[in-house]
Image: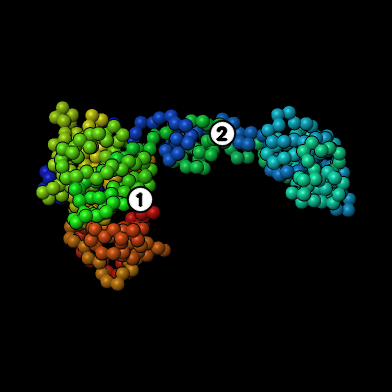
Amino acid sequence: MSSTAPRTTGQDRLWSVDEHLEDILATVRPLEPIELQLLDAQGCVLVEDVTVPVSLPPFDNSSMDGYAVRVADVAGACEEFPAVLEVVGDVAAGQADPLTVGPGQAARIMTGAPLPPGAETVVPVEWTDGGLGEGPVTGMRARALAPEGAAGQVRVYRPAEARAHVRDKGSDVKAGDRALEAGTVLGPPQIALLAAIGRGTVRVRPRPRVVVLSTGSELVPPGEELRAGQIHDSNSFALTAAARDAGAIAYRVGAVADDAETLRATIEDQLVRADLMVTTGGVSVGAYDVVKEALSHTGDEDEPGSGVEFRKLAMQPGKPQGFGSIGPDHTPLLALPGNPVSSYVSFELFVRPAIRTLMGLEDVHRPRARAKLTAGRALTSPKGRRQFLRGAYSDGTISPVGGSGSHLVAALAQANALIVVPEDVETVEPGTEVEVVLLG
């Protein structure tokens, strides 16, 4: 993976959100394409157009269980004067050598079976006596009374237009059509189409492998009892889930204690399965900011562009951030703050676009909208900072959820959008139209 060095102008500079994101997206490159089996390609992005080799359906076939007939033979058929036709045999789905329907004849046909030569239309079995010389019967009864292989005569009680209940060859897609465009994300419907046109493999950019690692000696996995001074590790679970939601294959690593050597060794061990490393915690200015201690000097003097730079951003929450590349393959690494809300907001603004870029997508950002603020009081924001507040968005309105504290996980769980307050705005009155980032 190629990379370029982030711009450096000193760690005391206050970087804007846009500058930091620009550096990340200028460094991260889409992963190299590979050929994958269909199910392995789910969630991946096509790198080339897919052309239909054979029309779909590949032949005219019946859309109903019934009888394949000539239009003229059932013209004017009714309850009082049914058309009486000779049943010449059955046409089943997958039948390779269909029989021929001549004047005054009918062939019992199953759904999906090819329309036999000579036949022009299909009358549903419910329009007939099921070949038993009785009045019209319903589908279930007709199938029970007229088993496969039965011959004789059938009475048809309704006329049928030409091509009625017939799926025309190529009515879905025709040979030579473009089935899917390059850049398409392969979901279940796209996988179904590829399978239907006979594609067993497809060329895609693979889903990025993202390793998520949290730091802090106070962190305990969920399910374990807390001791004095301990908290459960929520960040690594939130970020791993967010990475998967963005389209990545994400691996969560257990929390690493506040020890620089242990952290450095853990990161080096994880590089073998990482297209992107994400850490959370230890990037501020405290005495135990282990990520900064472990990664500030990881650059290789012989490898320009390697190493991690730590910055202060003009945003709230999420002021401390780290970004760079590490290891022999220059694996991108994003170091996020440790407070839960700061960490999640930072993921949405920086990590998600990086993941989507690795996937080869053109639109890497969450959608944005304008919404009217509904709040009981004015919102305040620090001057010179771009603030991102949690909100509940619905029908063009946005309501703040919780306070501005970066530790309020419960409020985050109730939010489906972020309210964006620009750097030059300190107060937002209720009723004001604001920009929102839609999270789902």
Give 113 or 382, whichever is nearer the viewer. Answer: 113
Which residue is drawn at the image coordinates 38% and 43% (left, top)? 247
x then y, percent, for residue 77: 84, 49
Horizontal and vertical percent position of residue 344? 28, 52
In the rendered image, the vertical position of residue 436 relative to residue 335, given as above or below: below
Q: Label 2 crowding class (10 Å Cα cut-off): few <14, some 14-19, many 20+? A: many
Q: Residue at x 26, y 57 (%)?
A: 388
Q: Tell me the element at label 2.
A: loop
Point 85% across, 45% down: residue:
132
Looking at the rendered image, the quarter that the N terminus falls into is top left
Give 380 or 188, whichever is nearer the viewer. 188
Outermost residue on the bottom side: it is: 376
Per the model, the C-alpha gap separating discs 2 and 1 is 33 Å
Q: Which amino acid, mark 2?
A: Ile
The quadrant the C terminus occupies is bottom left
Residue at mark 1: 366
Residue located at (42% from left, 33% from top) = 204
Q: From where the camera sits, is residue 315 visible?
A: no
Residue 326 relative to residue 400: left or right:
left
Residue 276 % position (x, y) = 29, 38
**Can residue 148 be seen at all in this image of the molecule?**
yes
The percent position of residue 13, horizontal first and vertical second, equals 13, 48
SS for callout 1:
loop
Find residue 197 and name its label. 2
Q: Would residue 385 be found to the left or right of residue 438 on screen?
A: left
Query: Are dots 2 and 1 in contact, CB under 8 Å?
Result: no
